[in-house]
Image (cartoon, rainbow, N blue to C red):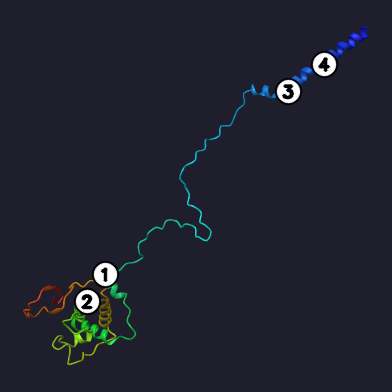
Amino acid sequence: MRSKVQWASAMALAATVFTALFSAQGSGAAASEMIPTLVEQKPKVEFVSQPVVQPLAKEGEEAPAEEAVETAPESEVTTLAQLVSEQSMPGKMSRQMRCLAGAIYFEARGETLEGQLAVGRVIVNRAASDRFPDSYCGVVYQRSQFSFVRGRSMPTIHEHSNSWRRAVAIAQIAQADSWVSPAKGALFFHAARVSPKWRLTRVGRIDNHIFYR
């Protein structure tokens, strides 16, 4: 009898221990909630309403290029002498251009480039005016207009001289109107040493010529 009581007591004790162990496993999650733990603080992420990057190109389109930066031209013509130096000597010159360059050569080859250009532009202006012949040769060879003309011809030109090359360059500039003439709009000129008393509007004097329109 005593052994039975001892066996029952042992069984009861085992049941108590088993129940305690089972209850502890079931409450493990709740128990861990009571223990304070360190939680990593992540930065707050905010979204903007506007895109901050360039949009991707659609299929078949080129990607958007970066904003172009305007740059100044590498070089600009700042003087008439520079423009003259950039003119090329033509291999074959037309008769009209030869008349224009010849007039510049004989009338003003000893003067400044501005003075030569002013003479050249007078011939160009006359050819464009209905008051004179409509070609450079017609203007140059018009009767009693240019003292260097002998009949229907010019004296011999030294074509290998720097003076002739400059006259040709000035003729090209005058024809293209690529430089403003200091005697803009002039149609007449005479040597400063004479006084013809013309009833014309004086434009000004450049070197040894006085210009009118």
Q: Position of residue 79 (x, y in %)?
A: 26, 69
Residues under labels 4 and 3: Cα distance?
A: 17 Å
Mark 4 or 2 closer to N-term? 4
Mark number, residue 117: 2
Instruction: Check contact, mark 1 vs mark 4: CB within 8 A.
Output: no
Q: Position of residue 55 (x, y in %)?
A: 49, 52
Instruction: Check contact, mark 4 vs mark 3: CB within 8 A.
Output: no
How dense is the environment of label 3, judged by Cα within 10 Å: few (below 14), some, or many (20 and up)? few
Tell me the residue at 52%/57% (across/down): 58
Instruction: Check contact, mark 3 vs mark 2: CB within 8 A.
Output: no
How dense is the environment of label 1, judged by Cα within 10 Å: few (below 14), some, or many (20 and up)? few
Q: Secondary structure at mark 1?
A: loop
Residue indicated by mark 4? 15
Q: Against 42, is 100 above or below?
A: below
Residues under labels 1 and 4: Cα distance?
A: 116 Å
Residues under labels 4 and 2: Cα distance?
A: 126 Å
Residues under labels 3 and 2: Cα distance?
A: 110 Å
Residue indicated by mark 1? 79
